[in-house]
Image (spheres, rainbow, N blue to C red):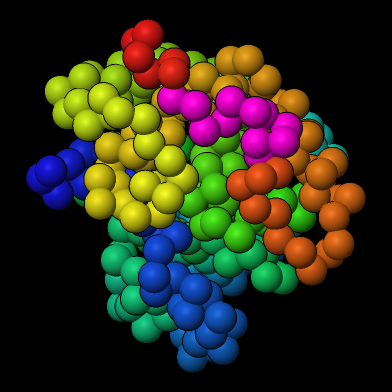
């Protein structure tokens, strides 16, 4: 499997961003931010940005606000995340993630961190998907939907992004992506045999599994739409606050969750 496809598919780095270093990075983020000289503009949500990046911050701000309004209304949240737009120098002083891998910091204050430069490889490819995926992490945290398995957290964030994009008129974009993912999987048929959650964690074929999961998400979305999130949120509220959910919760609600049968009928 060539790693070059990492450059092609936008969702991959969303999933990869959950691996390894991210946790450590996030733990120390607030302290590290103090060392940055960021400009600030207060509007409906706080926006911090590196010197000279006001324009980029406004672009993200407008994009995010539409999503925040939608999510707060749909899922009864009251999210007011902080938005942080960093140039490469500032980025590298707070995160070891590559500059093109945005991330969400889901401890209060909830924060979406995005790179400031325009024309960044990958990010331009599906800007909206990435922005709303990061916001999805924050909405999921507000709903207390937290899984022990990081890839499921990534999945939930992407699901929320799809939900917003569908209702915001990006259906065609998603259909185009779906066709590309499907075409890719048809050419790289490693899903001839069924695979499990463990395979996904193993990530040896990360990009293929990721695209498979993305297709599965869209499949679930067509059947369950917002109920998927409502059900998870309801379940999350019932559990002890300190207990993270695991994949058993998913299979309780959706017994066929780990079935990939739909792929064979593609
Ligand atoms: Zn993510």
Q: Position of residue 121 (x, y in %)?
A: 22, 49
Tell whether 257 sits left or right of 90: right
| Along the line of sight, the residue nearer the viewer: 98 or 245 | 245
Magenta highlight on residue 253: yes
Instruction: Point out the residue furthest to the front here.
Output: 193
Tell whether 203 sits left or right of 158: left
Q: Position of residue 172 (x, y in %)?
A: 42, 14
Query: In which quadrant of the rendered view does residue 231 lie?
Result: top right
The N terminus, quarter of image: top left
Residue drawn 44% across the image and 18% down it: 261
Residue drawn 43% across the image and 34% down it: 213
Residue drawn 43% across the image and 32% down it: 214
The C terminus, quarter of image: top left
| Along the line of sight, the residue nearer the viewer: 245 or 102 | 245
Query: In which quadrant of the rendered view does residue 20 lie?
Result: bottom left
Work out whether 132 lies above or below 134: above
In this orientation, does residue 250 appear?
yes
Work out whether 156 lies above or below 245: above
| Along the line of sight, the residue nearer the viewer: 200 or 153 | 200
Q: Position of residue 118 (x, y in %)?
A: 30, 51
Work out whether 200 lies above or below 187: below
Magenta highlight on residue 223: no
Q: Position of residue 162 (x, y in %)?
A: 54, 30
Instruction: Point out the residue furthest to the top here.
Output: 265
Q: Which span of residues is magenta-colored?
A: 250-260
């Amino acid at each position: 499997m060539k790693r070059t496809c990492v450059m092609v598919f936008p969702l991959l780095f969303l999933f990869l961003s959950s691996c390894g270093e991210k946790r450590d990075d996030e733990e120390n983020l607030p302290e590290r931010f103090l060392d940055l000289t960021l400009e600030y503009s207060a509007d409906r949500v706080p926006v911090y940005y590196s010197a000279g990046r006001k324009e980029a911050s406004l672009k993200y701000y407008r994009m995010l606000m539409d999503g925040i309004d939608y999510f707060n209304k749909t899922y009864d949240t009251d999210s007011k995340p902080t938005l942080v737009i960093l140039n490469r120098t500032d980025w590298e002083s707070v995160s070891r993630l590559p500059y093109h891998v945005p991330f969400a910091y889901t401890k209060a204050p909830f924060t979406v961190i995005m790179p400031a430069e325009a024309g960044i490889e990958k990010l331009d490819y599906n800007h909206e998907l990435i922005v709303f995926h990061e916001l999805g992490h924050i909405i999921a945290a507000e709903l207390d939907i937290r899984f022990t398995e990081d890839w499921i957290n990534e999945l939930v964030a992407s699901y929320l992004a799809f939900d917003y994009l569908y209702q915001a008129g990006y259906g065609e974009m998603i259909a185009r992506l779906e066709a590309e993912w499907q075409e890719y999987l048809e050419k790289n048929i490693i899903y001839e045999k069924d695979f499990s959650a463990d395979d996904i964690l193993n990530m040896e074929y990360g990009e293929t599994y990721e695209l498979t999961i993305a297709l599965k998400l869209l499949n679930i979305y067509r059947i369950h739409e917002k109920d998927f999130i409502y059900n998870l949120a309801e379940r999350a509220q019932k559990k002890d606050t300190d207990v993270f959910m695991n994949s058993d919760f998913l299979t309780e609600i959706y017994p066929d969750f780990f079935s990939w049968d739909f792929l064979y009928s593609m």
